[in-house]
Image (cartoon, rainbow, N blue to C red):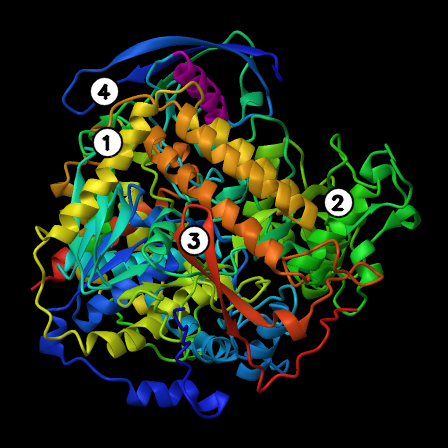
Amino acid sequence: MEGNLNLTLKIWRQKNAQTAGKFETYQVSGISTDMSFLEMIDVLNNRLIEEGDDPVAFDHDCREGICGMCSMYINGRPHGPNRGVTTCQLHMRSFKDGQTITVEPWRASAFPIIKDLVVNRSAFDRIIGAGGFISVNTGNAQDANNLPINKDNADDAFAAAACIGCGACVAACKNASAMLFTSAKISQLALLPQGQIEAATRAQAMVAQMDEEGFGACSNTGACEAECPKGISIENIARMNREYFSATFSSK
Amino acid sequence: MTKIDAKIPNGNLAEKWTKFKSSVPLVNPSNKRNLEIIVIGSGLAGASAAASLAELGYKVKVFCFQDSPRRAHSIAAQGGINAAKNYQNDGDSVYRLFYDTIKGGDYRSREANVHRLAEVSGSIIDQCVAQGVPFAREYGGLLSNRSFGGTQVQRTFYAAGQTGQQLLLGAYSALQRQVGMGNVKLYTRHEMQDVVTIDGKARGIIARDSVSGALERHFGHAVLLCTGGYGNVFYLSTNAMGSNVTAAWKAHKKGAFFANPCYTQIHPTCIPVSGDHQSKLTLMSESLRNDGRIWVPKKENDTRKANEIPEDERDYYLERRYPAFGNLVPRDIASRAAKERCDAGFGVGSSKMAVYLDYAAAIIRYGKGEANVHNMHNPTDEEIQSMGKAVVKEKYGNLFDMYKQITGEDPYAVPMRIYPAVHYTMGGLWVDYNLMTTVPGLYALGEANFSDHGANRLGASALMQGLADGYFVIPYTIGAYLAAEIRTPSMSTDSEDFVKAEKAVRDRLDTLMNIKGSKPVDYFHKRLGKIMWDECGMARSEKGLKASIKEIQALQKEFWSDVKIPGEIDNLNPELEKAGRVADFLELGELMCIDALDRNESCGGHFRLEYQTEDGEALRDDEKYAYVAAWEYERQSSFKLHKEELKYENIKIAQRSYK
């Protein structure tokens, strides 16, 4: 035992997409405050394996807050209680001895559950595939410094591009809307001169794909921005709406 | 003995690539439509290759084990990407980038490949900007640069501390565009289990759908492995949890030689281990050494807090030992110097296995600079601090935040504690100039190959190499092979070779599931990691390596008789996936020790205690060891060495000095 936290975990268990799921309760003890939340789950899982039980399936990869794979809904909030962090960067020092922690998967019909805490977020890939790019084949480019870009615009584009595609915005929204995710990409490219040529078709195609995937409408409550681990601003949604409407009005 | 031929074009170094491009056989557009290419891995190398090849008209399939191609671990690269643009007018050139890379690699890489890398580096920046990658810019709207280790020019392009993320998202966007157009078929949550060879050529793969557990057969006229490095053989590394050697190792067992496996990079600036629960280590970008100063107390076993230790009682040991490069010496040298200080009893923090990376001086310097910019003539200390912190935040904010999250300490107020950790592997599948392995039709790109970094990679060169291979090298070199394949029709996957390969994979998975032993996969992985870190990490010795080979062999036996894998074979089963990867790491670890034992010299990341200069620097033996060690798999625990001699025709090989 290296730590002193004793915790009660209520974790959503679901064998696969076809079976119904339910909460199971587990006790863990001796948890160090230096552990990350996922390392705490590792401790639980290794114990479950040794006891002959099926460990909790969860998505994770880089464990440094950038790949966007981890996706736990902890005590009613995507990525847990702290602002601006992913689950893998949430450390156990944010919890108290004796606390009960509830862990669920992202809940959204566009993110079907695969197993336990693992959901399918491929809808995001399809939204990007619909228009989240600049059509420039390899080898087409001019010299990079032939295109000066106002620093403020470049910085704003970067801030929007910092989205990690984790889906916390969708999980936080009562309508399971993907507006923050979609608008971040539309904004990034709309802020840059390279993105202007396709701006109208991009906004229309990405919004159409977003709707087709079954994401809900914007609730205007700002929960997405509050829960985004990368601080993606809700201003992006306003920019997307401008792009979308101007594209719609001017479309042939 | 199979002869290895690097197929380096004739002619002057600076003309080789141009001549090659102008004379390599072409495949006409109507034939490209009938040629299928399989790409494994969706990081910088895989995504850029898949997108570029699909743009050319080839039929491409991409496989990744993650839930989306955007998750590949290239996403986590922080500091930047090198390119010989000379935008800063500070004397950079293609030749200088080439020279720095060869020297940085301690004269153990291939001249022709490295020169090509330097030549295409500028086009990468152009391409990325055209895609909308938001690189850092100056007020005039032009691109900003910074310095990295092992160089004296500013040639590194960056996007805060998230350069890898932005580059990968650029390549991912290009890839998704091709997916949307139907030119690339994407298979996420799929892991390659084996390469299928027919009549000696790579003709496809067996993949496992991680969600259903189903095995699938896929045909390709060529197979590209863009599967990254094998740093997770050490258990703890800065790699993602899922990063693995499996695809490369399966290829190795099917005839692809594995080159220089012992060349691993231990990165000097990582967050130290906090306890036994540690599952991975986190890098603090090398770019932090631009502005941060590294030090330990002059007094042994000093227990005072960092801020209580006066300036004259601090040992800025890198500045002391290497005045010409100071804190910006290459990674291998910085790592060994940190280990030396900690081993000698000068380490800091509760574990004493850490050194300080201090931003106090940089904050003041930047603060004063800002005061000048804003015409403040008598700024207060507080104003200087606050403006300085704002500049540091803009440059490195996400890194500082990450440090605070992980350690609970505020790096703006107290120096960061750092220690070296496994980060990158220079070794990998042996490839020729065309990036083809010793199996015809099987290619390796990016970190998965061995080609460009010699015994030590310079910072900000991994992103450059991954994208160079994918955007600008493979689209040309693959023509040399595929031009002769236009008469090969798409093959049925019902052939005996595919059926046999699938059965072998199935049998192995069944065997793993049926062991029903007593220990989880992690137990074995941690033990392997400890052996590798202790004996095949920052310092290696004949005695230690010989003992390790025996220990690893014993651990392999134990694994195959006592591992316990829960769950089902036909459902999502992360433990089964891990078990397959660790089984391969156990074999690779053995080969790494064998390779390290063979190389009776010290060079770059490979440091043999028996071979060092009087002042503790690496001692190369160019007479005997100026070769690439390419290992052929014969059978379990038996590997045959082939040597590719390295000829330096343009650079005079010299002792590497950063003093």
Expressed as whole percent of the image width and height from the top left, the position of residue B99 reads 60, 78
Give the labeled residue for mark 1. Answer: A176
Q: Residue at x 37, y 8 (%)?
A: A25
Say if mark 2 contacts mark 4, CB within 8 Å.
no
Residue B608 in view (yes/no): yes
Q: Please determine whether, in this image, residue A164 is positioned above or below residue B566.
A: below
- Residue at the (43%, 69%) spot, across then down: A149
Boundaries of the magenta span: A37-51
Residue where numbered disc 3 is placed: B74
Q: In this view, does B570 lie to the left or right of B656?
A: left
Q: For the residues carrying marks 2 and 1, which lies nearer the camera in this image?
A: 2
Q: Is residue B451 magenta?
A: no
Residue B283 in the image, given as x and y percentages of width and height: 57, 46
Could you tell me which secondary element the residue under label 1 belongs to? loop
Work out how far the residue at label 3 is from the one at label 4, CA to CA, in angstroms: 32 Å
Residue visible at 56% across and 71% down in the picture? B627
Q: Distance between the residues labelled 2 and 4?
A: 47 Å
Left or right position of B213 against A104 = left
